[in-house]
């Protein structure tokens, strides 16, 4: 059905257009349309403008008329999550807060490996159910595009189980899922060979299957003392690039090194960056790599935020993602986390909003979303307020009242 729908009037509509991909953004640069309307056709925006003028011009459109004040924002893009998992790591959280470090807990049998064991024990159906539940919660919070990583399988069979579950969940969800293969999350404890042998096996056996079955076109690796080093990952990334995969990196979370590798390989994004120094910031800022801060991991681990202000001031492109995972970032609430990062890192509202909309879309190499303008996907959410500044000011407590995905109303708070 190719119906035309006119939605509005919006008290304010933030287009997030005309803004730079890199560097600082002042709030006064935001394009804020008052008494705006949006015309939607076949899932895309066919016009944005004054609501009254649009309704004059499109008398054949079905009108979705809003009552009261609403602010429209592009659908949020969460460019880094691990929401395919089983079990809980509430114990890790308690242990950390009682004084143990993330790495100590991992060495003592908790950490990522604990989730690997629980995820391997889960059936494919259980995994799909978990993804659907979590993704729908993100959708209600305004997220219309969600990246999801594998990485709790850590064998050919178990990584495939996760990526199949992500594909299945995608079929029943309104939120778009973007899958990423993170088989290089850590060397599985039950693997008898070397890290090099494990990575060689993954790249020669799993990579071709990912392409054949359309399971993922993004490859991620965790560069860290507890995971893999740069020398081990180089041949892995070389193979991935030669096969046409996009690269993204878990970088500079506890020790530096990952972001330099991301720049070396022309990765789409380098994520985490909590311990990036001026050297890494400079490298990232002089590259096309999107620097993705994960404030949810800082909150979950109780450690410092990525140097977001410095990254922007150096001229870098800053995205913000939730890192939703059972270990380091259990909260999974992007808007709350981005608001807090803004307050602690002194980011303008424009920079925070850019980080969870068009700059986050760039971190997934998606050009059809993250802004509201003609020809782009009609993905947006509405907040029941009279000014966009209220959204971040409420630090996540002002939730969307409606979420639209590809021109369809997929969440309406008033309808339960
Ligand atoms: O992004 N840093 C490595 N990976 C995840 C944590 C996963 C886990 O602890 O289960 C992260 O924080
Ligand atoms: Fe992560």
Image (spheres, helix red, strand yellow):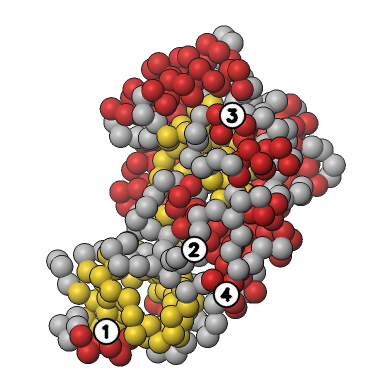
Residue 111 visible to the viewer: yes
Q: Are marks 3 and 1 in contact (CB under 8 Å)?
A: no
Whole-number angstrom distance, CA of label 2 to CA of label 3: 28 Å
Q: Quadrant of the C terminus?
A: bottom left
Instruction: Say which quarter of the image contains residue 371.
Output: bottom left
Q: Are marks 4 and 1 in contact (CB under 8 Å)?
A: no
Give the mark, 2 or 3, whose residue is nearer the N terminus.
2
Where in the figure is residue 349, as x and y percent of width and height? Answer: 61, 68
Q: Name the front one of labels 3 and 4.
A: 4
Foreground of the two, 307 or 382: 307
Foreground of the two, 164 or 20: 20
For label 3, the residue is 261
Give the mark, 2 or 1, whose residue is nearer the N terminus.
2
Give the mark, 3 or 1, whose residue is nearer the N terminus.
1
Q: Mark number for residue 28?
A: 4
Mark 1 crowdedness (10 Å alpha carbons): few <14, some 14-19, many ≥20 = many
Q: Name the front one of labels 4 and 1.
A: 4
Instruction: Say which quarter of the image contains residue 72.
Output: bottom left
For label 1, the residue is 54
User: Image height check: is 172 above or below 193?
Assistant: below
Whole-number angstrom distance, CA of label 4 to CA of label 1: 26 Å
């Amino acid at each position: 059905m190719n119906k035309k729908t006119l939605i509005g009037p919006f008290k304010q509509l933030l287009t997030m257009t005309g803004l730079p991909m890199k560097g600082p953004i002042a709030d006064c640069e935001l394009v804020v349309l008052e008494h705006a309307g949006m015309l939607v056709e076949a899932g895309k925006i066919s016009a944005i403008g004054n609501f009254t003028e649009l309704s004059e011009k499109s008398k054949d459109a079905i009108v979705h008329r809003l009552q009261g004040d609403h602010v429209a924002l592009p659908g949020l893009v969460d460019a880094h999550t691990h929401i395919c998992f089983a079990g809980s790591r509430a114990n890790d959280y308690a242990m950390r807060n009682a004084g143990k470090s993330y790495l100590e807990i991992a060495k003592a049998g908790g950490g990522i490996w604990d989730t690997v064991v629980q995820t391997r024990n889960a059936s494919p159906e259980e995994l799909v159910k978990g993804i659907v539940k979590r993704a729908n919660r993100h959708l209600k919070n305004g997220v219309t595009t969600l990246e999801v990583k594998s990485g709790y399988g850590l064998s050919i069979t178990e990584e495939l189980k996760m990526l199949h579950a992500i594909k299945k969940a995608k079929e029943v969800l309104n939120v778009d899922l973007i899958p990423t293969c993170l088989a290089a999350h850590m060397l599985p404890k039950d693997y008898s060979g070397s890290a090099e042998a494990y990575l060689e096996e993954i790249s020669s056996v799993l990579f071709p299957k990912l392409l054949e079955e359309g399971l993922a076109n993004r490859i991620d690796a965790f560069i860290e003392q507890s995971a893999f080093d740069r020398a081990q990952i180089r041949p892995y990334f070389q193979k991935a690039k030669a096969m046409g995969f996009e690269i993204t990196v878990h970088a500079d979370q506890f020790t530096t090194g990952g972001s330099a590798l991301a720049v070396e390989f022309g990765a789409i994004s380098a994520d985490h960056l909590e311990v990036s120094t001026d050297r890494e910031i400079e490298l990232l800022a002089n590259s096309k790599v999107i620097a993705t801060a994960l404030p949810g991991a800082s909150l979950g681990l109780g450690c410092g935020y990525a140097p977001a202000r410095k990254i922007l001031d150096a001229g870098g492109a800053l995205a913000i993602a939730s890192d939703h995972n059972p270990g380091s970032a259990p909260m999974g609430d992007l808007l709350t986390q981005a608001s807090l990062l803004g307050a602690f890192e002194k980011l303008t509202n424009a920079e925070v909003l850019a980080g969870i909309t068009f700059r986050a879309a760039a971190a997934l190499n998606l050009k059809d979303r993250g802004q509201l303008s003609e020809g782009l996907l009609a993905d947006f959410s509405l907040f029941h307020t009279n000014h966009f500044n209220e959204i971040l000011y409420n630090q996540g407590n002002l939730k969307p009242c409606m979420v639209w995905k590809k021109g369809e109303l997929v969440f309406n708070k008033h309808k339960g």
